[in-house]
């Protein structure tokens, strides 16, 4: 094996091991791991939001409320040169979209052949072609449940665009429910952007890292369905079940499917926090939260949800169960 590759692999394992600890460690590390995610904002330290930004209601005080936009904020920034809007819906763009929005296929962000996120070179090329600069605020929306939007959010944060990405709460459904203007034209190609993808290894977990971790220092969160977790639904995997010590909380539980006007928005801060704590995913700063699903699309949604709630160290398993459930050197439990 190439010596450089060996060194990089060992360093990557060490990054997560610092947070979660190695197996067979008698005493948990006494220090709090360094996190790539920003700590939850407090009244004393939180930056002032733009006066025109009404991302959430005052009754829903998400610690990282700046990551969530509403229809009002979106409408006010349609012609803002510093904002790029991306439509991450699987279909429907040609029939109508938010004015100025550009279609973005979230599938381009995954290297499915290797169960990894797309390379930094491909991500750099993609977002530069979309006109994203290093200081661009990116707003993403999808049909409404924020599943595809969260995948784009995670990819951009992993590649260094942290705290510059927002998701439209309720997505296109919220825009339509508000009877806002719809466009059918495709915006002209923008000037090449200056965005450069720089991976942050503190925002991802690999199979090798998972095998080496002391789960007393981590919270492993399976966000698939209950049937996938139990092994009743194989989803085409060779092995069914879940990774040992994983907790189960389905990603979609974060969305209020019965919200006003039928718009699927995120549940409020109090309800979400209570639900995660009841599952066993509390804000213990000495622990790293590792969400996973089948391909880290649903896992990315939970990454976003936990970021919104102010969790400070969240590192999705990018290979996810598509890798773990088909590897010869892994075991699953039912």
Image (cartoon, helix red, strand yellow):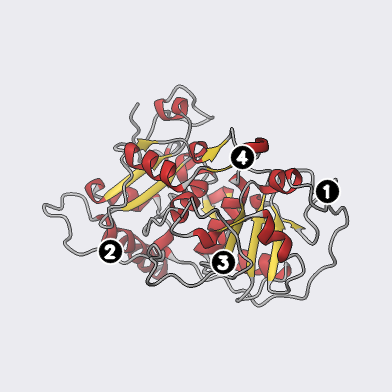
Q: Earlier in the sequence, mark 1 or mark 3?
A: 1
Q: Earlier in the sequence, mark 2 or mark 4?
A: 2
Helix, strand or loop under label 1: loop
Residue 95 at what x, y percent from top left? 85, 45
Q: Are marks 1 and 4 in contact (CB under 8 Å)?
A: no
Q: Residues within 10 Å of mark 2 (few under 14, many from 20)?
A: some
| Residue sitting nearer the eye, 154 or 65 | 65
Q: Position of residue 30 (x, y in %)?
A: 16, 62
**Dot 2 or dot 1, earlier in sequence:** 2
Query: Of discs 3 and 2, which sits in the foreground?
Result: 2
Q: Position of residue 104 (x, y in %)?
A: 71, 55
Check disc 3 and report the residue beneath it: 120
Secondary element under disc 3, as helix, strand or loop, is: helix
- Give the labeled residue for mark 1: 96
Q: Nearer the viewer, residue 5 or 182?
A: 182
Q: Local crowd at mark 4 within 10 Å, few (<14), some, or many (≥20)?
A: many
Residue at the disc numbered 4: 264
Of the two numbered discs 4 and 3 on the same chain, state the one appearing first in sequence: 3
Q: Secondary structure at mark 2?
A: loop
Q: Residue at x 42, y 36 (%)?
A: 249
Q: Are marks 3 and 2 in contact (CB under 8 Å)?
A: no
Per the model, the C-alpha gap separating discs 3 and 2 is 25 Å
Q: Which residue is mark 2?
A: 33
Per the model, the C-alpha gap separating discs 4 and 3 is 32 Å
- The label nearer to you, 2 versus 4, is 4
From the image, state whether disc 4 or disc 3 is nearer to you. 4
Extreme-top residue of the structure: 232
- Viewer-side residue, 198 vs 114: 198
């Amino acid at each position: 094996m190439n010596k450089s590759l060996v060194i990089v692999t060992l360093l990557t394992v060490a990054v997560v091991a610092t947070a979660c600890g190695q197996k067979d460690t008698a005493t948990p590390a006494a220090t709090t791991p360094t996190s790539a995610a920003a700590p939850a904002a407090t009244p004393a330290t939180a930056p002032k939001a733009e006066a025109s930004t009404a991302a959430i209601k005052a009754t829903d005080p998400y610690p990282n409320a700046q990551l969530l936009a509403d229809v009002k904020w979106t409408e006010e920034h349609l012609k803002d040169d510093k904002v790029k809007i991306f439509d991450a819906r699987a279909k429907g763009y040609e029939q109508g979209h938010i004015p100025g929005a550009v279609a973005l296929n979230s599938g381009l962000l995954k290297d499915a052949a290797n169960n990894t996120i797309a390379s930094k070179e491909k991500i750099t090329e993609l977002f530069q072609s979309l006109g994203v600069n290093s200081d661009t605020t990116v707003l993403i929306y999808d049909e409404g449940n924020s599943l595809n939007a969260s995948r784009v959010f995670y990819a951009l944060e992993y590649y260094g665009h942290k705290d510059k990405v927002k998701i439209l709460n309720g997505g296109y459904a919220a825009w339509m429910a508000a009877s806002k203007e719809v466009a059918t034209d495709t915006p002209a190609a923008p000037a090449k952007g200056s965005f450069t993808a720089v991976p942050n290894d503190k925002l991802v977990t690999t199979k090798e890292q998972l095998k080496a971790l002391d789960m007393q220092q981590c919270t492993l969160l399976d966000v698939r369905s209950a049937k996938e977790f139990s092994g009743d639904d194989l989803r085409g995997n060779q092995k069914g079940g879940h990774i040992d010590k994983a907790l189960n909380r389905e990603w979609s539980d974060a969305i209020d499917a019965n919200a006003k006007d039928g718009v699927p928005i995120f549940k409020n801060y109090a309800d979400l926090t209570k639900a995660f704590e009841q599952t066993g995913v509390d804000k213990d700063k000495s622990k790293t939260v590792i969400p996973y699903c089948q391909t880290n699309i649903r896992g990315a949604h939970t990454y976003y949800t936990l970021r919104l709630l102010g969790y400070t160290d969240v590192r999705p398993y990018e290979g996810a169960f598509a890798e773990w459930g088909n590897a010869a050197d892994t075991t699953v439990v039912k």
